[in-house]
DNA sequence: GTAAATGATGAAACGCGTTTCATGTCAAAC
DNA sequence: GTTTGACATGAAACGCGTTTCATCATTTAC
């Protein structure tokens, strides 16, 4: 790493900053109108005579006027800023979700503030705090750690949107019914003859994980399958985690014959590692991934398609909407070669 | 998609918002001190008697006071907000870069505003505009479309940091010397016996691409290799683009025997497609990827490691630093099985 | 031809902290 | 005993737009 310090001239700049930035008061004087009129021009209010409007516009151009947006924010009590809480920015799932959100934000002239939490609760708190402080108009929580009751306390400060199924609350949400989806996938594996089925999760906690766990519990009860706690493998987020998963099931006396993997990234990691280890897929190990990411298509992984970008879009729209709604999105099984 | 409108009660909330939010004036009255003193307490200024400090703190607690951060911003002329311009949030490269930036932002108590540009110039303009409007204190441009001269015009409004080699300017930057890196990789392929070497790029324009192109030009001149424009394949960003790449070189009468692929994602796509098509790697086609992403490790792709997170870290630090510096990061060839 | 609606415009209040400046107190210094 | 510096505190200015309200000028309506 070569560091080259070219110069240090912001100090000068700082001094220069003291120079007068023109404000609407100056403009008013220049255009010979009141500040109200200048404000009207800036906000395209209709009640301004063309003559004066032009005078103001000229003044604006003449002195290269730039609205101090912070004053606008203070005055309006709005910032056109939406907060997005998400644990990691480098997981494809969240990257895509963010993309969906960002595209809508752009369209509606909002900007996003990112809170990368790493699932640390205090960072979520910070985001809620910013809502209370009016730095953001609303908040999208893509995945949460703190508890719902706490979130509800902040609801009076602005819309909060979640990405999970919430019941009996005043929270907006867009989500996938993970219970149902998981059950469908499990049934599919059962039909295909699998009786020893395991699954991987990101974290153990979180609504989505709980739903999946309860689907699994109901599933093994339904078919009277043995409950093997080893079959639940947590902490699986990345491609690299795939090899761990395989190693851990290889160590079992009765390894699962099929795995429901809640991330295509991890599923891909598993596929790659199995290829390496000469483990035949699907014969020795069947797989269903999640998200239908490009990598799943590329590797021919059977997966559950989640309309991630669409979810992101909805999340954003809910964030700027007064109406509190709950949107359930469909997930779809994409049959490919790993089952 | 099932949409369920639970309720529409923000209207009420909006009315409620009219209720008095306590401000420092109220606090001052309650604590029987001046607003200055309240402000001092809030900002941990030392010159406040313990007695009054406690009185203020009590008032704060009593009425659940929350600072209006927009007023603070207006007053201070700073927002503790750094803008991040990047073309896509769903490419792993930018996801990792963002992660590096975000981690530092957190540590230094800054928040990030994301500008996803899709390489549309007007969106970069917006970011620059926000710097001018003081909505952000500084700006990190991870990849740019607009020209340098324009950026320089905005330099007086706050630090702007780039992620590319810039010469003779007052811009801070952290970058990889892509000319040198590319040349090293080309030389490596040459040593391994390759004479027909192609390469893929994201976009054709951009400093990094230009540097690579000029390295390539110098390379073929140095070894007197034929210049085949078909060997330059652009528009390669995603995993899925890998198959296209292979198809296009298959269509050539004299296909390259080696490819320098400026993204591990694309390299992975190529590897997968080749496996599918029974094209032997590296015998029929050698590959060097870029970034050393997990997927490259997983698939055993020879690649050039770029310290992306580290770059992100530096970018952020430069963004909040007065000093204008230029940091060149090292890239490193990681030999694996695709050459 | 007059009443009512619509168009235009400015003064002033409002949103809310921060910071400077003037003033005052008290203890240490000489 | 007086000077000096550190500690404390409040008034007022400052940062800067938006919005309400009162007022006046025109039109339109009947």
Image (cartoon, coloured by chain):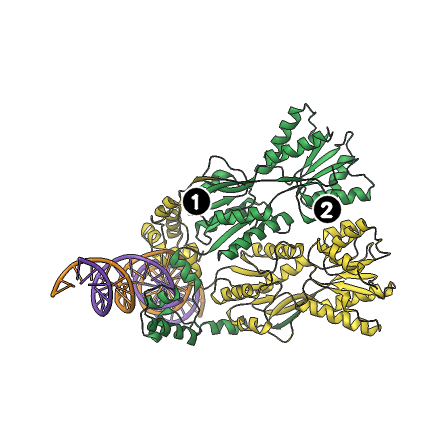
Chain colours: A yellow, B green, C purple, D orange
Q: Is residue A126 left or right of residue B271?
A: left
Quarter in which the C terminus of chain A is drawn = bottom right
Q: Secondary structure at mark 2?
A: loop
Q: Residue at x 68, y 26 (%)?
A: B227
The residue marked by circle 2 belongs to what chain? B
Of callouts 2 and 1, which one flags the residue occurring earlier in the amino acid sequence? 2
Pointer 2 with pointer 1, Cβ within 8 A? no
- Label 2, on which residue? B240
In which quadrant of the rendered view does residue D27 lie?
A: bottom left
Q: Residue B49 in the image: state x and y as whole percent.
A: 32, 70
Above or below, A41 relative to B241: below
Q: Residue at x 63, y 47 (%)?
A: B93
Q: How many marks?
A: 2
- For residue B323, the mark is 1
Residue nearer the viewer, B17 or D4: D4
Depth-wise, is mark 2 or mark 1 nearer the camera? 1
In which quadrant of the rendered view does residue B33 lie?
A: bottom left
**Label 2 and label 1 in one chain:** yes
Q: Residue B152 in the image: state x and y as whole percent.
A: 46, 41
Q: Secondary structure at mark 1?
A: loop
The answer to whether residue B328 is seen in the rendering is: yes
Distance CA(mark 2)–CA(mark 1) = 41 Å
Quarter in which the N terminus of chain A is drawn = top right
């Amino acid at each position: 790493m070569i560091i080259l310090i070219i110069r240090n001239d912001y100090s000068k700049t700082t001094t220069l900053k003291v120079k007068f930035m023109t404000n609407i008061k100056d403009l008013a004087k220049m255009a010979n109108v009141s500040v109200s009129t200048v404000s009207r021009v800036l906000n395209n209010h209709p009640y301004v005579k063309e003559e004066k409007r032009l005078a103001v516009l000229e003044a604006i151009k003449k002195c290269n006027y730039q609205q101090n947006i912070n004053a606008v924010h203070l005055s309006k009590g709005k910032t056109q800023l939406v907060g997005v809480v998400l644990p990691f920015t480098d997981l494809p799932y969240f990257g895509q979700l963010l993309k969906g959100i960002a595209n809508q934000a752009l369209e509606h002239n909002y900007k996003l503030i990112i809170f990368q939490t790493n699932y640390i609760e205090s960072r979520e708190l910070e985001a809620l705090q910013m809502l209370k402080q009016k730095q953001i108009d609303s908040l999208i929580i893509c995945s949460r750690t703190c508890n719902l009751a706490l979130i509800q306390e902040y609801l009076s400060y602005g819309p909060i949107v979640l990405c999970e199924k919430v019941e009996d609350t005043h929270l907006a949400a867009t989500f996938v019914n993970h219970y149902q989806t998981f059950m469908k996938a499990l049934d599919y594996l059962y039909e295909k003859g699998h009786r020893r089925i395991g699954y991987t999760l990101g974290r153990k906690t979180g609504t989505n994980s709980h739903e999946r766990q309860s689907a699994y519990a109901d599933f093994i009860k339904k078919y009277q399958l043995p409950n093997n706690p080893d079959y639940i493998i947590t902490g699986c987020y990345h491609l690299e985690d795939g090899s761990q998963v395989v190693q851990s099931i290889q160590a079992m006396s009765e390894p699962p014959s099929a795995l429901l993997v809640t991330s295509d990234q991890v599923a891909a990691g598993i596929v790659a590692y199995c290829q390496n280890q000469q483990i035949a897929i699907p014969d020795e190990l069947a797989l269903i991934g999640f998200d239908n990411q490009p990598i799943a298509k590329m590797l021919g992984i059977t997966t559950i398609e989640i309309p991630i970008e669409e979810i992101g879009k909805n999340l954003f729209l809910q964030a700027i909407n007064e109406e509190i709604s709950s949107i359930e999105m469909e997930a779809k099984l994409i049959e490919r070669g790993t089952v």
